[in-house]
Image (tube, rainbow, N blue to C red):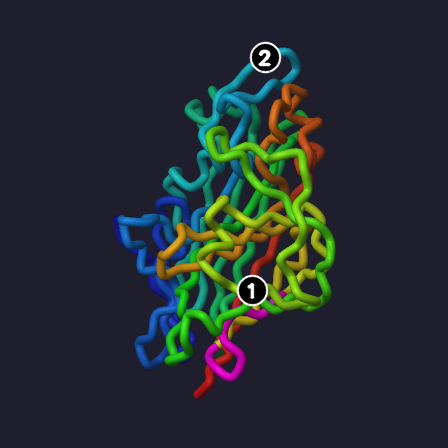
């Protein structure tokens, strides 16, 4: 499958139509800001999570008295998107419902993923359109894996996540065997608005905020190369890596895994939102490279 490449001169992005997934983001020096996708840890790059985020209880959800099965994070990441536009500095990808998707998710929909480069910034936007005649319940999330350490020479141990606002609220954790959200909140690892990064933080899987005050953060080493990341449309966040890997996933979400033991209707699941027929909803994630150079 041919990748789509776009460039601003300062940045170049390579996107795989399988999942409309960003595989590479490099600067004019050829330095890579995305994961190395080492198969010893995780081969993903930046999957798009739709129509669910995380795992379902028993990989099953209930809707209007019927049961349907979906794998963790849904099917968009394994779907081939149509390349609607492929310009010099922008690209647009689209996937729509099919007999295969309706067997596991009985709704008509259109999902678009847009990419645009401008200078040292990458602007991405996922757009969900209800193309059917029934209300459309869904969740959506971004799952990009950024290089850790970022290029530029700063030590891995010096990298932090700096939120735009203090985040004193408790975090949530995942039950390892099931992938479901544990009910007990956990003391926050954030010091004011700074999250120190260490592989030990992820020994119990992702760090999850189901109530986040910030809609932007900076990732990197103070005084070194950093990424400014804005996510104005998503109220939840996961940060994750496989301990020891050379990436950090910073994941803005609308929705999260099923709470442990959840057996309610899909529409009642925390984080699921609904679109009326003909309605659309967009979710942005913008990444700006702040180079130490």
Residue at image location 41% in from the left, 75% down from the top: 155
Q: Is residue 150 magenta?
A: no
Residue at the disc numbered 2: 66
Q: Is residue 171 above or below residue 262?
A: below
Question: Which quarter of the rendering shows the C terminus?
Answer: bottom left
Q: Is residue 224 magenta?
A: yes
Given residues 133 and 56, the one toward you in this image is 56
Q: Residue furthest top?
A: 65
Task: Please state if 60 lies on the left or on the right of 191 as rendered.
Answer: left
Q: Is residue 148 above or below residue 268?
A: below
Residue at image location 37% in from the left, 80% down from the top: 153
Residue 278 visible at all:
no
Q: Residues within 10 Å of mark 2 (few under 14, many from 20)?
A: few
Residue 186 screen position, x and y as percent: 66, 46
Given residues 81 and 62, the one toward you in this image is 62
Q: Secondary structure at mark 1?
A: strand
Range of residues picked out in magenta: 217-225
């Amino acid at each position: 499958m041919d990748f789509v490449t776009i460039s601003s001169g300062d940045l170049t992005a390579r996107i795989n139509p399988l999942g409309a997934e960003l595989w590479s983001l490099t600067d004019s020096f050829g330095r890579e800001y995305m994961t190395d996708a080492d198969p010893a840890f995780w081969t993903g790059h930046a999957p798009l999570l739709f129509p669910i985020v995380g795992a379902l209880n028993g990989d099953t959800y209930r809707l209007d008295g019927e049961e349907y099965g979906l794998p963790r994070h849904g099917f968009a990441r394994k779907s081939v998107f149509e390349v609607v536009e492929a310009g010099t500095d922008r690209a647009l990808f689209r996937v729509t419902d099919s007999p295969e998707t309706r067997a596991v998710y009985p709704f008509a929909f259109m999902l678009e993923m847009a990419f645009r480069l401008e200078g040292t910034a990458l602007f991405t936007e996922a757009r969900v359109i209800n193309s059917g005649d029934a209300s459309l319940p869904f969740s959506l999330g971004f799952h990009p894996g950024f290089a850790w350490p970022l290029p530029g020479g700063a030590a891995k141990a010096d990298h932090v996540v700096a939120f735009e606002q203090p985040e004193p609220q408790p975090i949530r954790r995942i039950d390892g065997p099931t992938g479901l959200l544990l009910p007990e909140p956990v003391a926050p690892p954030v010091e004011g608005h700074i999250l120190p990064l260490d592989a030990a933080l992820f020994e119990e899987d992702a760090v999850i905020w189901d109530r986040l005050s910030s809609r932007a953060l900076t990732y990197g080493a103070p005084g070194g190369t950093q990424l400014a990341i804005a996510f104005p449309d998503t109220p939840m966040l996961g940060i994750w890596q496989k301990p020891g890997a050379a990436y950090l996933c910073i994941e803005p979400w609308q929705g999260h895994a099923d709470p442990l033991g959840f057996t309610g209707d899909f529409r009642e699941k925390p984080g699921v939102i609904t679109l009326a027929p003909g309605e659309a909803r967009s979710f942005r994630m913008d990444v700006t490279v702040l180079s130490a150079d």
